Image (cartoon, rainbow, N blue to C red):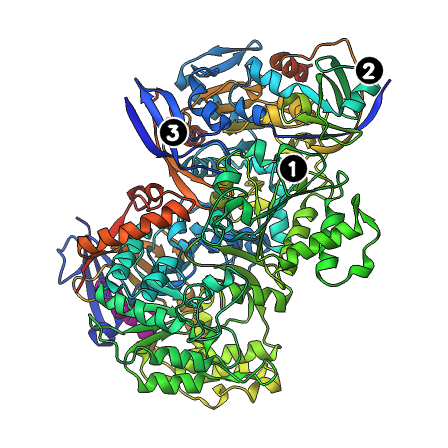
Amino acid sequence: MAVITDAICSLCGSLCDDITVTVEDNVITDVERACILGRNKFVGMFLHDRIESPMIRKNGELVDVSYEEAIDEAAKILVNSKRTLSYGWCSTSCEAISKAIQLAEETGSLIDSTANVCHGPSALAVQEKGGPSATLGVVKNRADVMIFWGCNPAHAHPRHMRRYSSFSKGFFTQKGRKDRKMIVIDVRKTDTAKIADQYVEIDQGSDYLLVTALRSAINGHEDVIPDTVAGVSKEDILKLANTLKEAKFTCVFYGMGVTQSRSKYKNGDGVSSLISDLNQHSKAVMIGMRGHYNVTGYGQVSTWETGYPMAVDFTRGAPYYNPGETGANDVLTRGDVDAAIISAADAGAHFPQDSLKYLAKIPVIQIDPYANPTTELSDVVFPAAVVGVEAEGTAYRMDGISLRMKKLIDTKFKTDEEIVVDLINKVRELKRGA
Amino acid sequence: MKLEANLISGRTAYQGAYLEAKTHKEYFDACSYCELNSGDLVKLGVSEGDYLLVTTEFGDVSLFAKANDGNPDGLAFIPMGPWANAVLSPDTHGCGMPGFKGVPAQIEQTGEAPLEMKALMRRYYE
Amino acid sequence: MSELLIKNAVVCDPINNINCVKMDISIKDGKIVESVSSGAKVIDAGGKLTMAGGVDGHTHCAGKINVGRFMSPHDMRMTNVPGLSGKEAPTATTRAQVGYNTPNAFAIGYRYAKLGYTTIGEAAIPIIGARHTHEEFEAIPILDKFGLTLFGSNWQVMEYIRDDEPEKLAAYVAWGLKASRGYGIKIVNPGGGEAWGWGKNVSGLDDPVPNFDVTPAQIITALAETNEKLNLPHSIHLHCNNLGKPGNYETTIASMKLLENLKTSRDRQAMHVTHVQFNAYAGTSWRDFESGAPQVANYVNSADHLTFDLGQVIFGPAMTMTADGPVEYANSRMLHAKWSNMDVELEDASGVVPITYSPKMFVNAVQWAIGLELALLVDDPWKVMFTTDSPNGGSFVNYPEAYTYLMSAKRRTEVIEGLPEMALGRMNLPGIDRELDLYELAIMTRAMQSKIYSMDTKGHLGVGADADIAIYDLKPDSIDTTVEYAAVKKAFSSTAYTIKGGEVVVKDGEIAMTPEGRTYWVNAKVPQANTDAMQVDLAQKFKRYYTVNQANYMVEDAYLPHPVEITTEAL
């Protein structure tokens, strides 16, 4: 029996690094301190529907094939494709992401991450107004006011509030929760809202109106604020603005309620502007609540390797970037790609129906440890090691801090990185042959 | 009776807990429901566990009815996943992001049970 | 065993007192040797200028630059310097390239190599973010890398200074260098990063840091003493307080004076003051703003304990990025520009803001002049490192353009003629006729770096040096660099050959091969008892205040595939 301490949980963007894992006969039998999400990933993994063998769809059914046959078939798809969509790469290591980008570059593909359906608009907002942020420990040590805007950590990031935010204790926040005012802005009373000091319910899709009203108040233009904005009374808006101005340190955590609702990236742009304005009065920062454990790492690697954080199109050789045109769902709904490779993310579960109808029409290659809805749409399937459990590698926490994930148990499966390297080599071989 | 609702989707702890077990019943249970507040369920004449048909401009899907009194009137919530995506908006509005929140929907009772995951996905080959 | 013989090289090698002398260079296994066998591969340099590979001792190439890239997709398409900016498709040898001020990692490697640079130093590594820095280092091809670790607003550092615990302070700094795999001590706006945690700043050397009861002057002095105690190869590397503010030259000189009497443990400076252009401003506001370069240069000429670098401004778009968080916020408000910020728990702050330096703007015109004045008014070129603080003053791909400003009064006059009248009265440049020669340029771009970083295998071409060599398409005996500045710029923009570790990486301005570079870091040894005592305090920091466990904090060996470990013994 081995007990591994300080293991990193590779589930959500909180990337908790204090997990203790017990391994018996190469099976994880216990984890300490993980939330239900993390626990199920570690302990539950042997109960999950592991893909056991490479598969190719023949006569409509996926049948087991050798690894070499699958590599051969997948490489042919990539070489014959005019423009492949490479998608996902967020539940894997930075080392695998780097290789995926190289494969996309060599095959003239378009490569995008799960940010396309998550915090992509936040990246656009940063490109409009910048991202005034901080590491999570700064919030833990300093923040006396925190706003959770359109996010629900009680469900999506269960240990966030204890480790980093509401309930954490730090240098200037020794009393923890008592030292902090917790505000939730949302369209429905979530479990996070239920434990807040103040819940501000807004009309769905009106985030931009509220952020604009708050900016008006903070910048001394109360007179332009109507009696009600976004379903919130002017009086409440002025009070909230005052709370923020009088805070010592405010952090706005924001989630899909901000990025996916009407106005999309303009909402994040508004929050960034609000943070800039607030710093005229007190200290304020913003942090996006990232979902996949390494979607932040994807953005980092893609940015230093291609110049852009997502939605990078290599069709013309040099990287081209234009979300709205080169996002994964943009090209699928337009029918602008003729093959896809999907790894470490599940487009089948998380893309709207029009995109999936198109994926069903084109050859799809999947690399994943587990069978999922994408498998149902795939034509070549590679089983992969679970990164962060069966393979080591780098991941980035939601605040941009990178950590090295440990290998906890052995596996017979290849890693995403190894599979992609095999694909790169096979593609080169086929191109030389041609 | 049909309810005109505003449909949003999002994460839940249980959706997340079975994220890597999507062929299992636990994932089906965690994602194949639609939440309305009890008042809206009463208006539709359904109880928790009854079937709802959610229809939008983009498709329709059968779901289990579930009550959540945190929801304001007319706000429907479906956990992110294949069932929600049967009816959410594919329009990326020029910035890449599909419409996962704020989709106008009609909701009514149905006799059709929700499809399990593989059957739901098979619809995309039709 | 690979051998290479470079014949007919006109060598400019100030470390070895060689000023444009025609000679042969022998290379074996990546090093410069006395001679090679007759089987050696031969390159005929044909009388061309040959220098050691350039060393950029202060550039932002890994870490924070990624924030700059992330927020500026427009930069990827900029083609301001043809051949060294903008988009390029991948080739059989090279990966795809993009960018100007914030190029992708591959382009950084290729473009520095084309300029004849073979070693670069990242200016600021937060310890907790060091893993990221080393990931980017690994992605930068060809070049050798090193980075300076931030200590100037670090809680453990400030507490040890406040509590007068010099031994523990030394043990902590040694540990921080190891944790970050850093090369030296960087201090940015000492104490200011902590004040910025509350949206505030420190106003000068004697303004106490909120809640920590130490002053910036104490931080500088204590870290400089620690630096010598640890016998580090570089001195402290200081970004002074009050950067970017009119009148700040006084703070800068006062900061320099702090260490006049510091006894150094090695034959090198006691302090390096960085991007002094941004810290040599006179006047009391932006209205009466003027150059403070003469005052700073006068002091530097009178002192023998310091070196500095320029932070030269290049007209056009740039991207400012610094651990000086409050400066970046102020920039963004003044310029109405987008603002990214990253406060780093227990350690420091940082910010990134795009800027455009316009020759039509009086302030920008004076800033441009100040950098050049500093280089030209300081008599001893061994005290001056050429930098643009890339990309703060401008992208490194503009270095050749900037060389012509230093080497040709005629070229300067051309530029000055386009500047606003108001600016001319606030600068001294029009009255300066000094023109640097190739020897002085070689000092400022590679030789002095060899000394200030104690890198005895870099920055020169003597036997035993790394075979990092730049051959420029310029014949020193037949060019007047004060007049033919277009030819100078062209030659320095794309080498005839760049050789890295004995391998030809650039030939005729094209990338020939892309070996992986090495990473230098300093392992400073201190008595174990001091480390043990320090660890007791540090453990509390991790237990109570950090959000990363100590076991996951230090950069692992996996992130330095080609490390060069410099070991020092504490005195």
- In the rendered structure, the answer to whether residue B103 lies left or right of residue C111 reads right
Residue matched to label 3: A418
- For mark 2, does the 10 Å Cα neighbourhood hold few (<14), some (14 to 19), or many (20 or more) residues? few
Q: Are marks 3 and 1 on the same chain?
A: yes
Residue matched to label 1: A193
- The amino acid pointed to by label 1 is Ala
Image: C495 above or below C433: above
Which quadrant would residue C523 be assigned to in this image? Answer: bottom left
Q: Position of residue C198 (x, y in %)?
A: 53, 61
Identify the residue shown where x is 57% and y is 33%.
A154
| C188 magenta-colored | no
Residues in magenta, as a range:
C443-461
- The amino acid pointed to by label 3 is Glu
- For mark 1, does the 10 Å Cα neighbourhood hold few (<14), some (14 to 19), or many (20 or more) residues? many
Q: How far apart in space, not on screen, are marks 2 and 3 (Cα)?
A: 55 Å
- For mark 3, does the 10 Å Cα neighbourhood hold few (<14), some (14 to 19), or many (20 or more) residues? some
| C446 magenta-colored | yes
Identify the residue shown where x is 57% and y is 64%.
C329
Label 2: chain? B
Residue matched to label 2: B45
Q: Position of residue A420 (x, y in %)?
A: 43, 30
Query: Quadrant of the image for the N terminus of chain A?
Result: top left
Q: Are marks 3 and 1 in contact (CB under 8 Å)?
A: no
Label 1: chain? A
State the SS at label 3. helix
